[in-house]
């Protein structure tokens, strides 16, 4: 039974010096617990923040303990009346091939809504983040211009589509041709910008002749700096992430005060946990749109437990189109 531990805190970009695969015993469940076989592991950018020993909205990972995060697993032994062998569940679980969990911290996955992996993507935390960030903070309206950075990722690819559902003109920024093609050809994004190939300032000015009403920011940094001067009066900035700075120690972030004043814009940060009481609403919208074909998704898979670290590192070099997952085992 293998597990992956954080053995050293990264000061900049994480690599194999920081994560280690170790062999451990297979644990046994006690009353109200289940033994789970890990099927799919989600790697997410926020995990980088948990590798730092600083106070934040989630506890730092402890050194020499397994990393934990979103997982889809199958019950292989149950000491709980709520679950039986074979059930597919999701929860926040340690990166182990077999893991024991309290039954009351797991949720059964409904396989009729889509492949079980969607519970880690479009019907899970990233999808809910897109839904609440855009609808609640972004307040999208017909005909408005919505700019999305990190547009081809798990959150971004849902944001651009929800923006289209609300009738926005959508501008998507991403880092490869494959991603910009996916955005324009499959997700109907009006204008795409490849920030690694194009002059982002010129491309954005051309893409947003009416200015920017909503900026859904997944990346921060230079890209955000380029969007701010284009903000319209009463624009909304949904500060979802800032991945461009996660590996830069003491990053001061972009300068935006003057732009907020000039545009009377609103900026609001959030974490998806803020919307805990409304998850059912978000989930119902996302699953309905998925069923109706208004919302689609892509997943990028790595195979094998030992490749979880590489899949995580790849988030910072943009290896993933849509949601990055690791397939650990067959059910
Ligand atoms: P993604 O699937 O978007 O994966 C990360 C992507 O970020 C990469 O594929 C890459 O795409 C892009 N990226 C990496 N480094 C940089 C960089 N230096 N500059 C610009 N883009 C970069 O991840 P998620 O959809 O899971 O998360 C997106 C963002 O949302 C993250 O910042 C994350 O922390 C945040 N988030 C916030 C939540 C909240 O509650 N507030 C909840 C969930 C996510 P490319 O090829 O385009 O560069």
Image (cartoon, rainbow, N blue to C red):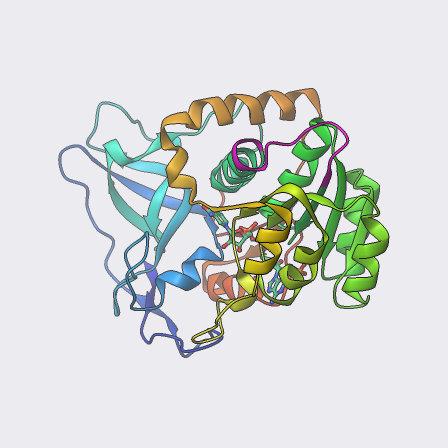
Instruction: Tell which residue pokes out farthest to the left in this image.
Output: 31
In this picture, which residue range is highlighted in magenta?
Answer: 135-145
Q: Nearer the viewer, residue 107 or 155?
A: 155
Q: Position of residue 186 (x, y in %)?
A: 79, 40
Instruction: Pinpoint residue 321: horizontal percent, then vertical percent.
Output: 67, 52
Q: Where is ligand 1, by quadrant?
A: bottom right
Q: Say if residue 86 shows up in the picture.
A: no
- Between 170 and 237, the residue placed more toward the observer is 237
Does the magenta portion include 136?
yes
Q: At which x and y percent is residue 157? A: 66, 43
* Residue situated in front as seen by the camera: 28 or 206: 206
Residue 177 sits in quarter: bottom right
Relative side of 74 to 102, left or right: right
- At horizontal 47% and vertical 22% (from top left) the residue drawn is 281
| Left-right relation of 54 to 161 | left
In x, y percent, where is residue 74?
39, 38
Identify the image quadrant of the N terminus.
Answer: bottom left
Q: Assess whether residue 311 is covered by the magenta stretch.
A: no
Q: Is residue 24 visible?
A: yes
């Amino acid at each position: 039974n293998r597990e992956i531990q954080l053995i050293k805190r990264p000061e900049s970009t994480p690599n194999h010096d920081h994560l280690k695969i170790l062999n451990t015993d297979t644990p046994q469940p006690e009353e109200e617990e289940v033994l789970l076989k890990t099927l799919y592991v989600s790697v997410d950018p926020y995990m980088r923040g948990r590798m730092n020993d600083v106070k934040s909205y989630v506890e730092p990972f402890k050194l020499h303990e397994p990393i934990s995060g979103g997982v889809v697993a199958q019950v292989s032994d149950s000491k709980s009346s709520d679950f039986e062998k074979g059930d597919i569940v999701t929860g926040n679980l340690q990166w182990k091939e077999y893991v024991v969990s309290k039954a009351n911290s797991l949720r059964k996955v409904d396989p009729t809504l889509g492949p079980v992996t969607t519970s880690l993507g479009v019907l899970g935390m990233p999808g809910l983040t897109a839904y609440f960030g855009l609808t609640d903070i972004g307040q999208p309206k017909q005909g408005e211009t919505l700019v999305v950075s990190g547009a081809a990722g798990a959150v971004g690819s849902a944001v651009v589509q929800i923006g289209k559902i609300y009738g926005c003109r959508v501008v998507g920024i991403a880092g490869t041709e494959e991603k910009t093609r996916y955005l324009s050809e499959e997700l109907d994004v009006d204008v795409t910008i490849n920030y690694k190939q194009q002059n982002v300032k010129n491309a954005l000015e051309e893409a947003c002749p009416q200015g920017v009403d909503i900026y859904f920011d997944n990346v921060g940094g230079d890209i955000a700096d380029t969007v701010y001067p284009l903000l319209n009066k009463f624009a909304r900035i949904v500060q979802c992430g800032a991945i461009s700075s996660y590996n830069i120690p003491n990053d001061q972030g972009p300068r935006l005060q003057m732009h907020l004043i000039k545009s009377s814009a609103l900026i609001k940060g959030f974490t998806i946990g803020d919307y805990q009481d409304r998850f059912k609403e978000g989930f119902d919208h996302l699953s309905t749109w998925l069923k109706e074909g208004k919302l689609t998704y892509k997943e990028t898979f790595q195979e094998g437990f030992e490749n979880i670290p590489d899949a995580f590192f790849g988030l910072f070099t943009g290896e993933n189109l849509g949601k990055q997952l690791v397939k650990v085992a067959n059910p």
